[in-house]
Amino acid sequence: MSKESTIATVTGIVFRRTIRSSYACLDVLLPADSNNYEDVHVIASVQFQGVHDACQFRSNLKRMCKIGNEIQLKGCWDDENIFNVHLDVGNDDEHHLGLKIVQPQVMNTIQCQNLREKFCPVAVDRTKATALTANDNHIKQPYAKKLPPMKKEKEHSEGNADKIHSGGLSKREQGEMVRDFLIQVIAEKELLQCNSFANDKTKQEEEEEGTCTSYLMKIDNHVHLEHCRVENMDRATLKKVINFLNSGSGVLDVAGGSGHVSLAFSLLGIKSTVIDPRETVGKLPGRDRKILKKAIRGKKNAMDNGEMHHESFLPPPIEYASLRAWFAKRPEGIDASFREGKSSGQLLHDDEAVPICTICSPENDDLLRNCSAIVSLHPDEATGDIVDFAVEHRIPFLIVPCCVFSRLFPHRFVVDENDEGKHRFVSTYKDLIQYLARKHSSIRMSKLGFSGANIVLWSMFPKEENN
């Protein structure tokens, strides 16, 4: 190989990649051919710094340079094994980076891992390890990075089970936990027992809540999570709650994504509708979709054969509905490529735009106005609109907020705990919970049984305020 600076084209297989905001580094294998008597390791360098629309370049690079793909690079040699990729601004997307896909997945993961061990071995002692190469001249010093110390493995015991991501729960299990919590709240609170929230608190608790500034001190522990399972509920009470949730248009699962929360309601025969702007709205993974179909088929066969069991008082499992739409409004500055399946720079025509589901739209009037409750698990940008809609129309709701999106919503402020006369910008998860909880005096807070974003905000609203 020569070190000429003229434009050259090489073809190789990507077995490792590093992509950062200002640069990208691809470890490419050039297979042996008539020019090379043995496999050659080449580092393809891409510089994004100072380049217009660098975000689009990075997206194209991530999409095309998958591990194991065979690609063709266009650029010039900087060193014997360093190849600078050209950025061809103005061409179509596929050639923006001076590369194209020759054949996808030429090598599998194990083969790529073997190449990394061969060309970029790592020292065993990770506390003092550095990235080494078969030939120090092949890779310059910037590519020899120090590795962080090895973290000790966590023991999966009862003492630290809450430290595991999401409590070790799958999406389906989290959906069932949200469903059971809503059923327990309705059963124990106003809609069935007509107890006001104030009567659930002692005088000391009311004084503490009035003086404390930490939102964690305000969490309502009246609903005991260890009992929040439908299996532990009285049959008559559970039947009443299910009948209430099935009233009108049923439960709205807002920003429900694939529909795991609606899956949990469907297994109990509760009507629900998933509302989400993504193309995959309501499309469960195969294993979860099979669970629902098997439950529906099993219940139907049991009823046809006259087989009655202890759960026969429950309605049979049903399919849930899906609606691809924005709830209340379309937030400005959202990631359109993820939410709507469109490129961030691509304009939406009127006939292609994702509709907005509002109470004023004729096609959605009955769905929103007559829903029994609104439920949302980690709704991202729709969080504030969900709470505002529920409070305005006094619809029972339950929401588990997650991301803050402080740049997307710069108008959100909360009272500063250190100085009540001042307001500060909502920039943390704690601030978001406080901001949402103060939208109505009846909103309560509890914790669900998984780690991470597990604070649940809910309100059944006093009976005199319900529509």
Image (spheres, grey):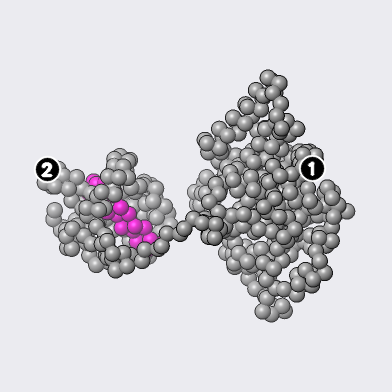
Residue 293 is one of the magenta-drawn residues: no
The answer to whether one can see residue 27 in this image is yes
**Which percent across, then down, holds residue 459?**
76, 55
Write the residue at 51% across / 49% down: 337
User: Which callout, 2 or 1, points at the residue further toward the start of the chain?
Assistant: 2
Check disc 1 and give the amino acid type.
Thr
Find residue 34 and name its label.
Answer: 2
Above or below — where is 62 with respect to 305? below
Q: How many marks?
A: 2
Write down the region rendered in magenta.
9-27
Classify mark 1: residues with Cα within 10 Å, few (<14), some (14-19) or many (20+).
Answer: some
Magenta stretch mostly in which secondary structure? strand
Cβ atoms under marks 2 and 1 closer than 8 Å: no
The answer to whether one can see residue 355 in this image is no
Instruction: Give the quadrant of residue 302.
Output: top right
**Which percent across, then down, holds residue 273?**
68, 40
Q: Is 112 on the left or on the right of 427, as rendered?
A: left
